[in-house]
Image (spheres, grey):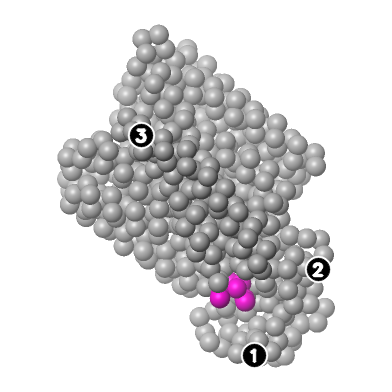
């Protein structure tokens, strides 16, 4: 293989050939204007078996010779452990903040004298702005630099967290939460895109395993840390530390990202952004998320049903617009070619019910333990800690299991989760209403192991055929689907729980067992679907 270096300023005269799938080459630059471009005549595409060419500008000092070997190139593209930690902070903070608020809502209601509708907006404002902007922010990272967008998002998230912690009223808190959700949307797609665009297959698998571990345990960390901070009532500040704690963490993340995260972006696609598609996608997500998050608290008013019924029409208009943009040879917000990838379609069909069940489980767990079981916020958080620990261990071990069993690990993990949920249902049925943290621990450990094997492996399946040049779009659609599924899970199974719990015939115990049973069915469905992927 021959390798040549050319100055960045001569990029137009030494343009890299396009990949076999027609996508633009990828560039990784540092902050220096003296960055270099390395042209590799034979780099395997992530989307096809044929060889392609890729343009890489190394984020380091200028090359001292006209040739470098392949080892030096691989090292320059590698995302260091500290760099991986830096981008994972951009996942930990947004996911934790999505769940941590649930623990503090009663304290917020008393302190801010907020109505139920305003409290719902504290959750819905964050979730909606987060989901609506994910795909757009992923594409912006492809165009203008993933590191640049990540740093912007981290800065905005840190400032918004400070505003949330200092908010004097519920209305201002809602506004700060909307900004916080938008900032989260800037960060999260860049994390996945950076992992996809740097390193070799082995380091990407490791990065995705850590991503899955971080995304999974962040939900549990939200419960534990939220309960600890609210119970501690530091300096009589009540709920405010759950937001203020993000400030020092965000500053550390910024310092690390500035030093250790390389810049990556796509060359040649900065001239056009699909704003019409962006508006249609945003309208579709708003039509789904706002009624689902606000409808129950407001008694399902007419406008909520109108919005829900308009969602399929808006989705159809968005799909037609994306096909039109792609046929015109322009850069679509969500290229149909990405969605049509076999692994993308099948992976999303499994990950959506998985996350819907996961969100419903966390929602029902919080209500049940802090309601009829009389756990305080801290005790409820610590009770679910065994699930977090087993999840972390299993998700980090997942790449080794995949190397041996392939995607069959999803089947195995789903069956383990299924078994753990049955054990949990049996434990609740036998010990209710004297259920304590220690008797729940064995079931939570089994559930955590199963989820830890499934979640990172599903991420890996979904992104396996997405070309590097479309990493932002791929990660955007995956995280958007994840976010919408979380809302759907709470809106459907959560509403079912709230409907059944007051019933004299069913009661809280029966409602909890029904939701756990539904999640077990979802685990079985994921096992069956993953079996088809594994066989193929």
Which of pointers 2 and 3 indicates the residue nearer the eye? 3
Task: Report the magenta residues as a range.
Answer: 264-271
Residue 427 shows which numbered tag? Answer: none
* Residue denoted by label 1: 10
Q: Position of residue 512 (x, y in %)?
A: 44, 21
Q: Earlier in the sequence, mark 1 or mark 2?
A: 1
Q: Quadrant of the C terminus?
A: top right
* Residue denoted by label 3: 302
Q: Earlier in the sequence, mark 1 or mark 3?
A: 1
Q: What residue sits 47% from the left and 28% below the top?
A: 493
Residue 1 at least partly seen: yes
Real-space Cα distance between discs 1 and 2?
A: 24 Å
- In the figure, 312 relative to 490: above or below? below
Residue neighbourhood size for the residue with mark 3, other residues' Cα within 10 Å, grouped as few (<14), some (14–19), many (≥20): few
Residue 247 at least partly seen: no
Query: Is disc 1 placed on a helix, strand or loop?
Result: helix
Q: Position of residue 457 (x, y in %)?
A: 65, 45
Badges 1 and 3: C-beta atoms under 8 Å apart?
no
């Amino acid at each position: 293989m021959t390798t040549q270096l050319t100055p960045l300023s001569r990029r137009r005269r030494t343009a890299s050939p396009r990949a076999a799938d027609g996508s633009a080459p990828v560039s990784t630059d540092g902050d220096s204007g003296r960055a270099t471009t390395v042209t590799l005549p034979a780099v395997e595409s992530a989307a096809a078996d044929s060889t392609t060419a890729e343009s890489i500008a190394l984020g380091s000092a200028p090359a001292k010779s006209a040739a470098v070997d392949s080892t030096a190139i691989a090292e320059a593209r590698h995302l260091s452990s500290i760099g991986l930690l830096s981008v994972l902070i951009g996942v930990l903070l947004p996911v934790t903040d999505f769940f941590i608020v649930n623990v503090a809502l009663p304290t917020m209601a008393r302190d801010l004298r907020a109505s139920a509708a305003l409290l719902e907006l504290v959750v819905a404002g964050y979730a909606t702005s987060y989901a609506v902007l994910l795909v757009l922010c992923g594409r912006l990272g492809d165009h203008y630099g993933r590191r640049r967008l990540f740093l912007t998002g981290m800065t905005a998230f840190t400032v918004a967290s400070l505003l949330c912690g200092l908010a004097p009223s519920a209305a201002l808190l809602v506004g700060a939460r909307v900004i916080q959700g938008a900032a989260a949307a800037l960060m999260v797609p860049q994390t996945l895109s950076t992992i996809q665009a740097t390193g070799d297959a082995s380091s990407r698998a490791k990065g995705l395993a850590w991503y899955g571990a971080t995304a999974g345990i962040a939900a549990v960390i939200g419960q534990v840390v939220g309960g600890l901070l609210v119970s501690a009532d530091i300096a009589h500040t009540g709920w405010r530390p759950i937001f203020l704690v993000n400030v020092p963490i965000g500053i550390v993340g910024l310092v690390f990202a500035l030093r250790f995260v390389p810049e990556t972006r796509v060359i040649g696609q900065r001239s056009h952004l699909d704003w019409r598609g962006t508006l249609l996608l945003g309208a579709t997500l708003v039509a789904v998320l706002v009624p689902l998050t606000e409808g129950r608290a407001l008694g399902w008013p007419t406008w909520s049903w109108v919005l829900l019924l308009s969602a399929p029409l808006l989705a159809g208009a968005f799909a037609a617009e994306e096909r039109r943009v792609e046929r015109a040879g322009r850069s679509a917000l969500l290229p149909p070619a990405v969605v049509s990838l076999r692994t993308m379609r099948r992976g999303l069909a499994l990950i959506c019910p998985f996350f819907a069940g996961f969100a419903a489980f966390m929602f029902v767990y919080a209500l049940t333990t802090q309601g009829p079981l009389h756990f305080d916020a801290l005790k409820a958080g610590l009770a679910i800690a065994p699930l977090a620990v087993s999840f972390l261990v299993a998700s980090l071990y997942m790449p080794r299991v995949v190397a041996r069993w392939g995607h069959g690990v999803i089947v195995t993990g789903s069956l383990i989760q299924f078994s753990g949920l049955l054990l949990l249902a049996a434990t609740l049925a036998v010990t209710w209403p004297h259920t304590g943290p220690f008797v729940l621990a064995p079931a939570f450990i089994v559930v955590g192991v199963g989820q830890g094997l499934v979640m990172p492996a599903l991420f890996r399946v979904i992104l396996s055929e997405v070309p590097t040049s479309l990493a932002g779009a791929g990660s955007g659609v995956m995280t958007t689907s994840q976010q919408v599924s979380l809302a759907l899970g709470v809106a459907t199974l959560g509403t079912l729980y709230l409907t059944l719990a007051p019933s004299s015939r069913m009661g809280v115990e029966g409602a909890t067992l029904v939701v756990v049973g539904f999640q077990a069915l979802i685990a079985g469905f994921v096992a069956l679907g993953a079996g088809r992927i594994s066989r193929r």
